[in-house]
Image: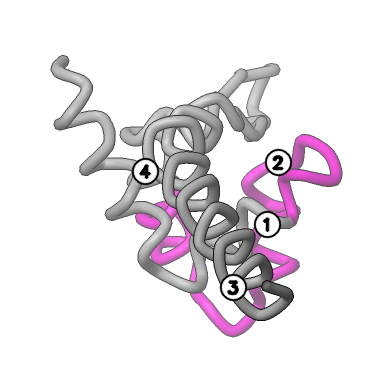
Amino acid sequence: MSSELEEDLVFKALAHPRRRAMLDHLKEEARTTGMLCEAFADMDRCTVMQHLKVLEEADLVIVRREGRERWNHLNALPIKRIHDRWISGYAAHALALLDKLKADLEG
């Protein structure tokens, strides 16, 4: 899969607030699908599973099965790649602008 397609999947997955909330839950520790259903009781199990599928397709969630349980683990590497590719470069540019502004104000 091309890196552009991978990035698109990650951005799509992160675009929905419920999926971001699920990732926040998984940041603390791995959880079973049942645990996530309890945490998001306002959604039915099918909807939780659909969100998990999008997260899994974006490689943000790694699933490990133990018997009848499905354990969901956060995989933060795709988010780090997005940060390295997009955010860090823009942050460096913004810091340079702030440094220039400070120098202009002081000088």
For the residues labelled 1 and 2, say whether their Cβ atoms are less than 8 Å apart: yes
Q: Please state which of residues 67 and 6 is positioned toward the viewer in this rendering.
A: 6
User: Would you say 66 lies left or right of 76 here?
Assistant: right
Task: State how far apart marks 4 and 2 are (Cα).
Answer: 14 Å
Percent coordinates x, y for residue 88 in the rendering = 52, 41
Task: State how far apart marks 1 and 3 are (Cα).
Answer: 52 Å
Magenta-span inclusion, residue 28: yes
Quick one: label 4 or label 2, which is nearer the N terminus? 2
Looking at the picture, which amino acid does disc 2 mark? Thr
SS assignment at label 2 = strand
User: Residue placed at 47% from the left, 47% from the top?
Assistant: 87
Dot 1 alpha-carbon crowd within 10 angstroms: few under 14, some 14 to 19, many 20 or more: many
Task: State how far apart marks 1 and 2 are (Cα).
Answer: 6 Å
Q: In the current view of this chain or complex, which residue is farthest to the front?
A: 107
Q: Nearer the viewer, mark 3 or mark 4?
A: 3
Q: Please state which of residues 28 and 101 is positioned toward the viewer in this rendering.
A: 101
User: Would you say 92 lies left or right of 1 here?
Assistant: right
Task: State how far apart marks 2 and 3 are (Cα).
Answer: 55 Å
- Determine which residue is flagged by label 2: 32
Looking at the picture, which amino acid does disc 3 mark? Asp
- Magenta-tinted stretch: 25-52
Percent coordinates x, y for residue 71 in the rendering = 67, 31
- Determine which residue is flagged by label 4: 53
SS assignment at label 1 = helix
Quick one: label 2 or label 3, which is nearer the N terminus? 2
Quick one: label 4 or label 1, which is nearer the N terminus? 1
- Main SS of the magenta segment? helix
